[in-house]
Amino acid sequence: MANTTKFYKLLGVSKQASTAEIRRAYKTLVLKHHPDKGGDEATFIDMRRAYEVLSDKDKRARYDRHGEEGLDERDGGDPSDIFNFFEGRRPQRKKTKSVVTPLKVTLEQLYCGASKKMSITREVIDEERGVRECRECNGRGVTVQVVRMGPMIQQMQSQCGACGGQGKSFQTAKQREILEVGIQQGAPSDHKVVFREKADEHPDADTGDVVFVLKEQEHAEFKRKGADLFVERKISLVEALCGFQMEFTHLDGRKLLIKTSPGEIVKPMAKGFDPLADADSSKTEWEEFDGFDCPGIENVAEGATTDIDTLKKACDTQLKRQGVDVGAFVVDSRKAYFKQCTREEVLSSMKPANGKTLYVLADPNRNKEARILKAVKGEGMPTFKNPFIAGNLFLILTIDFPESLTAESQAALSKLLPPPLSTPKVKEDDADVEVHSLTDIDPVQSHNSNKVNMAAAGDGAYDEGDDEGGSGGMQGPDSAQCQQQ
């Protein structure tokens, strides 16, 4: 009797195993027995032949009835494919088109983690009909037609119309499936959740994937930047000077009571600083020292240009690709000299040098004080793939100043607050002193209202001397003499 179990034993599956189970078993064994991984080459060839037969429904049916004797020579595959696989040149098998779908997620779901059930409908090969060899072309994919033209006989070869040149006939069926998309804590926007081999099926191609791309939705209160969260709040001047307590409902529903430390003062945020702006990390900042050099540090490269923008770009591109991390460069009237060093080494070896300009990597902490914000440590977003570590929760505080204060209130405050920085030496009743009071004026409106009076001569629609009776309409002797001078 024919042996019909050998191939199943090679792959470690039962005779009732599905095609998907056979595929998974084969992938696992490849990682273990591949010759490049130290496996036995003969065992690997036997496993590959077993997979090629059992993964094809027609071949598997013949094998189940007659064993290896029931297979044709071509059922073993092309031996050259195996050697190409060993040499790292395995032919690429086609793959059906993957399906990519955006999936809206809330900040709460990204904070807490969640799962969404998504329905997909795909084309799968009809299990009952299976894949069969095309009867019209006998699996060749082409048909040959004999045409008689007088005494001559000509053979015309064309693509088989029954199977479209595939050599096989099969039917597909619609299959609906529910996929549970896991949303991991701290996952970034545009993170991809991939379901392998869940796209449309085709007998001559690997099945594509279904990919869900997470799209973070804007939150009404919280703003996110990486693992940090930001909340905008308005506080009064009293709260800024004397402290405050503030209630928050976090993304997971917890109630937070946030308060300042005793004696702590909240200062306005630095002008022009936007903590939510994306910093351009690819652009290196440089500090310029005109008339200086650092001759004690060896040059690692030279540049035949003195264009500063080109030299700065070269530090971030060409030199960095060559493994040179430039800490400074010096420019004279002819060339530029690049130095691989730290900022501290440059500053300690600086010397005056006429006609040279030294460019040093800027101190990354030079604006640190201006960037400081009030924050609650560890109450930001969970870190992706490490949710036990969280970012920070920052407060973007705007101080709401009062419109005015009574004279009594101002006098009382002046006794409590530090002395003023501006103390005039003149008095209001001095003879040569003019007293003015401040008022609120919109500078844009002020500029627009005076624009017509500030136009340069010749810009107006009507200029003096351009009318018919004016001096601009005629040239007298004096004007001609003036032009010649």
Image (cartoon, rainbow, N blue to C red):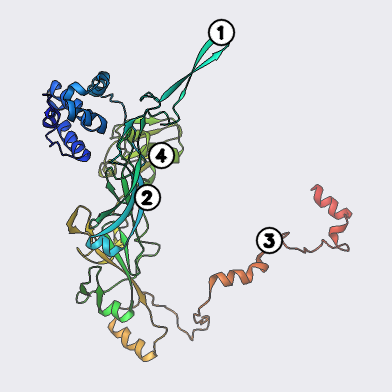
Considering only vertical position in the picture, is 75 above or below 368?
above
Q: Which mark is residue 313?
A: 4
Along the line of sight, which residue is nearer the eye, 194 or 49?
Answer: 49
Q: Is residue 355 left or right of residue 294?
A: right
Q: Residue 35: x, y in percent?
A: 16, 24
Residue 35 can be seen, yes or no: no
**What residue would you read off at disc 3?**
456
Under circle 2, the secondary element is loop
Disc 1 to disc 4, C-alpha distance? 77 Å
Q: Residue at x 31, y 47 (%)?
A: 210
Residue occupied by mark 1? 151
Q: Earlier in the sequence, mark 3 or mark 1?
A: 1
Q: CA distance from mark 3 to mark 2?
A: 41 Å
Q: Residue 280, which numbered label? A: 2
User: Which comes before the other along the chain, label 1 or label 2?
Assistant: 1
Which kind of residue does numbered mark 4 sit on?
Lys
Q: CA distance from mark 4 to mark 3?
A: 41 Å
Tell which of 94 and 134 is nearer to you.
134
The three-letter amino acid code for the residue at tag 3 is Ala
Dot 2 surroundings within 10 Å: few (below 14), some, or many (20 or more)?
A: few
The x and y percentages for residue 133 are: 33, 29
